């Protein structure tokens, strides 16, 4: 029987100034398995979301997998899908991007060896379903990614992150809806704010790849965080307090988690102590940058 196992990293998008553009893969993973069975569809969720994620055809991993098969002109075989979910949901750590990426990679694994999807096809499918490429690009390819779209579709450039960067994700107990966060964005922004973010996001690419000591200056933002602050006041307060102490803290994705891009493990330990003392309901996850991105293992079988 054919069995495909995929491992997908959590991601943090925006990274402060790089709204809808920059993203980073983190060493925190969901693992999904698809096994070809004799009939029907079985979906089992273990871990995050096991009480509320649908286990029928509306399941995001399944609907993504099916879309890829449909587009490639293939009939989906009966499947047993098992999801080992670690990435917290609704926290700005790329859980929906991971589900979409996972569905695509399961499809890619099941379609092999008859069909081998290209990197561009993977990104096209993922962006079509997720809407914007800043979470799915690092989930697929790992590292730090710059993602953009033009008339031909989504594109990405993957970069290696400097070894001096020590990411820390701070996760609150509450969730935030990306849809709500996006509804708080204005239609247009002052030109000075646009220039401000162009300078900081350009600087951030240099800081994360060459000069970690610049991450504090490079993580300022005027395009999204303030507009969304009213929907996540505790996130704003934590970022303000961490930045007042010199920690390069930003909203992770659409929030409400906080990402701190420290340039020194000792400073990261200080930030963790502060959060444990002053924001005790928040969970601190000291992580590494994942450089590999989504991985696929295919066991036996000869295509479908
Ligand atoms: N760039 C997106 C946003 C990330 O901030 O809305 C969340 O998917």
Image (tube, rainbow, N blue to C red):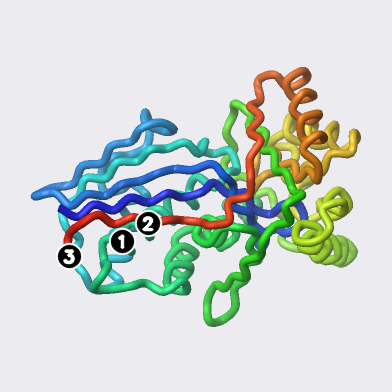
Q: Residue at x 35, y 32 (%)?
A: 46
- Residue 124 in picture, x, y percent from top left: 46, 70
Dot 1: what SS?
A: helix
Residue ID for mark 3: 302
Q: Which mark is residue 296?
A: 2
The answer to whether mark 2 and mark 1 are in CB contact below 8 A is yes
Label 2 to label 1, Cα distance in Å? 6 Å
Dot 2: what SS?
A: strand
Label 2 to label 3, Cα distance in Å? 16 Å
User: Of marks 1 and 3, which one's residue comes earlier in the chain?
Assistant: 1
Residue lying at the far bottom in this picture: please name it.
Answer: 152
Label 1 to label 3, Cα distance in Å? 11 Å
Q: Residue at x 59, y 29 (%)?
A: 174
Q: Which mark is residue 276?
A: none
- Residue 185 in picture, x, y percent from top left: 70, 53
If the image is split into quadrants, where does the C terminus sit? bottom left
- Residue 275 in picture, x, y percent from top left: 75, 25
How many marks do you count on the picture?
3
**Mark 3 Cα-neighbour bin, 10 Å: few <14, some 14–19, many ≥20:** few
Q: Is residue 97 left or right of residue 50?
A: right
Task: Single out the mark in the foreground, 1 or 3.
Answer: 3
Q: Which mark is residue 109?
A: 1
Q: Residue at x 74, y 28 (%)?
A: 272
**Mark 1 Cα-neighbour bin, 10 Å: few <14, some 14–19, many ≥20:** many
User: Of marks 2 and 1, which one's residue comes earlier in the chain?
Assistant: 1
- Can residue 16 be seen? yes
Dot 3: what SS?
A: loop
């Amino acid at each position: 029987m054919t069995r495909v196992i995929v491992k997908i990293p959590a991601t943090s998008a925006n990274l402060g100034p790089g709204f809808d553009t920059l993203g980073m893969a983190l060493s925190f993973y969901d693992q999904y398995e698809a096994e070809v069975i004799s009939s029907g569809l079985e979906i089992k969720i273990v871990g995050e979301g096991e009480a509320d994620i649908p286990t029928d055809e509306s399941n995001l991993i399944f609907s993504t997998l099916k879309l890829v098969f449909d587009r490639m002109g293939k009939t989906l075989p009966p499947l047993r899908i098992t999801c080992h979910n670690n990435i917290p949901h609704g926290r700005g750590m790329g859980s929906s991007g991971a589900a979409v990426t996972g569905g695509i990679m399961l499809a890619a694994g099941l379609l092999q060896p008859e069909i081998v999807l290209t990197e561009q096809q993977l990104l096209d499918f993922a962006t079509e379903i997720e809407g914007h490429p800043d979470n799915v690009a690092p989930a697929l390819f790992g590292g730090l990614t710059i993602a953009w779209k033009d008339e031909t579709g989504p594109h990405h450039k993957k970069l290696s992150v400097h070894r001096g960067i020590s990411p820390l994700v701070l996760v609150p107990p509450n969730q935030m809806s990306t849809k709500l966060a996006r509804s708080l964005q204005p239609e247009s922004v002052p030109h000075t704010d646009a220039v401000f973010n162009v300078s900081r996001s350009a600087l951030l690419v240099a800081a994360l790849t060459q000069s970690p000591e610049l991450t504090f200056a490079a993580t300022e933002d005027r395009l999204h965080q303030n507009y969304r602050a009213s929907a996540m006041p505790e996130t704003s307060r934590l970022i303000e307090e961490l930045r007042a102490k010199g920690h390069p803290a930003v909203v992770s994705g659409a929030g409400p988690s906080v990402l701190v891009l420290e340039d020194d493990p000792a400073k990261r330990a200080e930030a963790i102590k502060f959060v444990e003392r002053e924001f005790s309901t928040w969970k601190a996850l000291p992580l590494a940058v994942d450089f590999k991105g989504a991985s696929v293992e295919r066991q036996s079988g000869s295509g479908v």
